[in-house]
Image (cartoon, grey):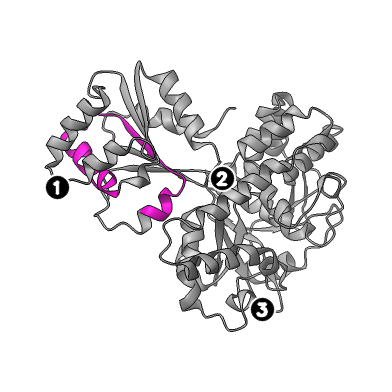
Amino acid sequence: MKRKIYEQFMEWKNTKSFKPLIILGVRQCGKTYIIDEFCRNEFKNYRKINLLYDVDVVKLYATDEPSEKKYNDLKALLDFDFEQEDSILFIDEIQESEELISDLKFFQEKHSNVRIIGAGSLLGVKLARLNKPFPVGKVTRLYMYPMDFEEFLIAFEQQPLLDKIKDCFKNNSSMGILHNKAIDYYRKYLLSGGMPESVKTMIDCGDDYYHYDLSKLNNIIEDYKNDMNHHIANASETLKIRNIYNSLSSQLQNASKKFQYSVIDSSAKSREYSLPLNWLVESNMVQLCQCVKLPEKPLLGFVDNDVFKVYYSDVGIFNRLVNNDIKTVMLDDMTMYKGIITENYVANQLKANGVDLLYWKGNRDSEVDFLITTKDDGIIPIEVKAEEHTQSKSLKVYDELYHPKYMIRISLKDFGYNPETKIKSIPLYATFLIKNLIK
């Protein structure tokens, strides 16, 4: 399946002065598949190793030998000269050797002609807790996420529908009769989420989505829970990580939606749960949305570090965790969780397209779900609605205080603009295109 990160891989390949490439992302989002495809398609000579199984490489880098000797021994061990022209080495599960990660600095400084890509399922956690020095400035990092809605439509071979969505976004014109078709695909996405294996399962169902196999997502969730036992100091921290993860649906159901440690445990303290929460963020199983105290440029300069929301990294997984079945999602009967699932979907789409997750909380119980800094129109507030019939009280409060050029409401409504309210309507299925307002 086509992934947009492939274009970033090509940019890295075509740079004259390059660094080892590190790919971070949550387990099962398709890192290994797309890296392998890129290496096979774009290089004549390709070797892949996996440090979970190629333990001799781990043992080699655990020795006290000089970096140059390790480098030459690695070539001999793999029987692969990665210095030859048009060659690349892919090291999967690279987190199993922090000594090798640290030695990427040597590769970049002494053998900068060598192409290396590293990836791993819990690589973000490992990088945050390295005992060896991390090669700061000597590697290139890219973050990969579950498939966004654009990639989802491409996988379903819906290019004409995708082209129509992009054209209507650009011209702020109606989708017409295609609006309902796009909504149908949006609901399919809510059910499957963006994990490639789950998306493929949905594709294999054809139009009979009632035969979609929910066990695919159940298995991913079990893998996540198993991961919570890895790179953990003790069983107590594992329990805290699981408790945080399981609490997120309740956290988002709060009136304020902000993350509260007391929801996990009435006696919970931030100092006890900050490291477990960081583990979840670093593993990319969750996504943090920070609260902005004052919507001024630069937004990151006005973040309140003590106030934030936490979303699941994939909306399909969210639906499974709250036991929403196929009928509930596809027939739009998500009564209890509909609002927060919709908001979680929008957060995932923004994050996957390089948009910082930020929101604004004001007085008078007003809150704007997301804030973006556009390239032409300054800071713009975004409100998310799960229905077609909407009210935007918080946007009205925000407008009275800060007078943005316009405001965005993401909902089930078609594209449109109301000059009286200054509200630009964007359908939920077009959320991924908000990146075009920024870049």
Segment tinted magenta in the rendering: 98-126
> What residue is disc 1 on?
64
Q: Quadrant of residue 161?
A: top right
> What residue is disc 2 on?
352
The Cα–Cα distance between marks 2 and 1, rounded to whole angstroms, is 40 Å
Using a 10 Å C-alpha cutoff, classify the residue at mark 2 as few (fewer than 14 neighbours), some (14 to 19) or many (20 or more): many
Q: Which amino acid is tagged 2?
A: Ala
Using a 10 Å C-alpha cutoff, classify the residue at mark 1 as few (fewer than 14 neighbours), some (14 to 19) or many (20 or more): few
Is there a contact, CB below 8 Å, between mark 2 and mark 1?
Answer: no
Foreground of the two, 383 or 284: 284
Residue 118 is covered by the magenta coloring = yes
Q: Which amino acid is tagged 3?
A: Asn
Foreground of the two, 395 or 105: 105
In the rendering, at what x and y percent does residue 145 appear?
A: 54, 43
Left or right of 56 on screen, residue 331: right
Left or right of 74 on screen, residue 363: right
Q: Which amino acid is tagged 1?
A: Asp
Q: Can residue 68 be seen in the rendering of this structure?
A: yes
